[in-house]
Image: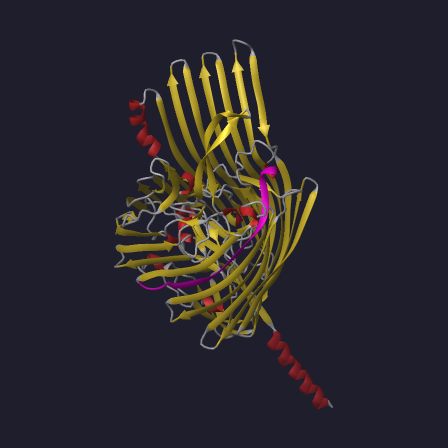
Amino acid sequence: MKQLFTFVFIGLAFVLQAQEKYTISGYIEDANTGEKLIEANVFDDATVSGTVSNLYGFYSITLPKDTVRLSFSYMGYATQSFEIYLDKDISLTIRLEDELTLQTIEVTADKVEKIEEQTQMSKIEVPVAQIKRIPPLLGEVDVMKAMQLLPGIQSGGEGTSGLYVRGGSPDQNLILLDGVPVYNVSHLFGFFSVFNADAINNVTLTKGGFPARYGGRLSSVMEINMKEGNMREYHGEGSIGIVASKFTFEGPIVKEKTSFIVSARRTYADLLARPFIKRNTDGEYGGYYFYDVNAKVNHKFNDKHRLYLSTYLGQDVFYLRFDDGGYEQRAGFDWGNLTSALRWNYMINKKLFANTTLTFSRYQFDLGSEVREDNEKYGSRYTSGIKDWGGKIDFDFLPNPNHYIRFGVNAMHHTFSPGAFQLEVDDVNTDFDLDTIIGSQPTRAMEYALYVEDDMKWGENFSANIGFHFSAFQVKGKTYVSPQARVGTRYLLPGANAIKASFSMMTQYIHLLTNEGVGLPTDLWVPSTNTVKPQQSWQVALGWAKTLGTDYELTVEGYYKGMNNLLSYKEGASYFSFSDWETKVEQGKGESYGLEFFAQKKKGKTTGWIGYTLSWNNRQFKFINSGNKYPFKYDRRHDVSVVVSHSFNDKISLSGTWVYGTGNSITLNEASYFAYIPLDGDDSNHQITEIEVPGEKNNYRMKAYHRLDIGADFRKEKKRYERTFSIGAYNVYSRKNPFFIYFDNSRNKFKQVSLFPIIPYFNYSFKF
């Protein structure tokens, strides 16, 4: 018996020792700048387990007491590996060297988590460095246009920056800048986006299989994270182009403690044209410009506490002026965004990380005119917009390598201003004053959400992300609630082939009223109400993923998305909402389904991707198109994109993109005839009126869209800075792509209007 107890005691001691575990945690950052690296990989060769850093660079991995062989890797950075005997908890900040500073010609992917090893599907990350190599329109690097080159994502039309993701519309995309919603992402009527690539650290777009932490939109979530500022040295960069110039400056306020970054951009076409306009128009002149400013301050209290304050301000301004002595006339309109975020990161312990954020977001459109003559003043103004105040707290809990648990809560207060028209009259001679406002009054609403999800692994072959998202919306005494299930799975087959599947439900409480044309700044943001229900969708996707060698990633995904309570203007209704907008809209349903193929090369002198999408996108409303189903305006059967970048050496690189897409659907009249209309019931007194016979909704397709863009960069290291000359052309073979179609009465036929022929560009940029 004594021997038996001794044996059991020794056996139990071995079991307890085998179960003894410790945690290695900390941050992963750029060795040169201190920037946090998002979704960097941590892998232990001994236990064949790993994790990734979160949105703020924090990682945590819990392993058995033993010798561990850890590798830390990130796309474009040199992998760092070491061996250590783990017998206690360790705090470890990892600083990876940027290989791009040593080898500008390569983007490396050694030991980075392969796509078939990831549970998440329908998620795309494009490095900012790669975005900057894509040939731009008029020399302006554009994040949104880079996203349009990916499968399942398309543009609304020539040059526009809106995203139509898997059959959705732009308002169904949740676009977050440092965690703050941005409601209008367009400059210059959609030809440029509001995001300055020089101020951006990371861009991620999720178009399906949404984890539970996301909510509030139906089609996609796009996360854009600003740079945090160099903690160690002062650096700057800028560029001068034919449309705009920009400059970025960053550095430490207190080395290794506090840093800042400021980035500004402005067009100057109005400044260059103004002297010529004034000289030729006898007191009448006008112009257009846009500007934006990004700023951020980052303070590290210690290894556990960090504080960030970031802000964005952007504005588009169009103006007309006429001054002729005693008569003065002014008119114009402007629109823009203001966002701010105050964020506190707190490492509660080795396994639990918290992020608390306070946010503010405002979008406003303002259209006005004013006439002054002698002692009289007449003015009118139309305004609309949306303003948000929000707060949220998110937790990351990593108990062991087989579970990554996220949970959190958030609340947001919305103020909707769907459109108000103000009239003002001031006549000193008659003492007559008028100042009145016509239109919808501001509406206030509260939106809440809570979530929990677990990214879990069972063995080496199966993993799943299972979560639950619950949201609520309160407006005008009405409360909507929405429980939403989220499931994503991955199974690894022999030969490193991964099969992935996902199911997600989404609810959207806010809507964008638009006329389905070019994205106008007059589009109105409105809430769900007693009569207007929240939009809802469910999406299921099935896919295959594989890495070929170390250079190529292949994915194929099929999806189906059903949508309910979609919002549309009634036929003939106007988007200028001087009366109750709820009477001008109706709700219906939609469906989108398709197949996406994506092949990407991430390493070597030649990088790029090929994307192809085959899709169908339909809408159905009771009082539109006689209640029959019709193709959505942006239903596009085939969509192809080819992106290639080649570096000859560290001084010269060449890039090109080619895109092809089925033409957009439009509604054209099928016939017209002249009719005699009696006046005042008198048949002898009549007028002749042309009557148009409309066809089915979106009954015609414009010609296919395709174009080729090319660009070349010439870099040179100077003594104190690096300069780059960039030249290229948009639409190289000058394809006359359709922008819109109208009926020419003089020729009795429809005519196509094209926007952009071949447009060369030149850009000079520098870094120091």
Residue 631 location (% of width, % of height) = 49, 52
User: Relative to residue 641, is residue 491 depicted above or below?
Assistant: below
In the visual, does 704 lie left or right of 575? left
For image coordinates 25% across by 55% down, the residue present is 652
**Observer-nearest of 744 and 709:** 744
Indicate the colouring scheme.
secondary structure
Closer to the camera, 307 or 462?
Answer: 462
Residue 497, position in %: x, y? Answer: 46, 73
Q: How many marks?
A: 0
Type of secondary structure dominating the magenta stretch: strand
Residue 90 in view here: no
Q: Looking at the image, can residue 243 be seen? A: yes
Q: Quadrant of residue 624?
A: top right
* Residue 654 horizontal/vertical position (percent): 28, 55
Highlighted magenta segment, given as a residue range? 583-604
Residue sitting farthest toward the right: 1
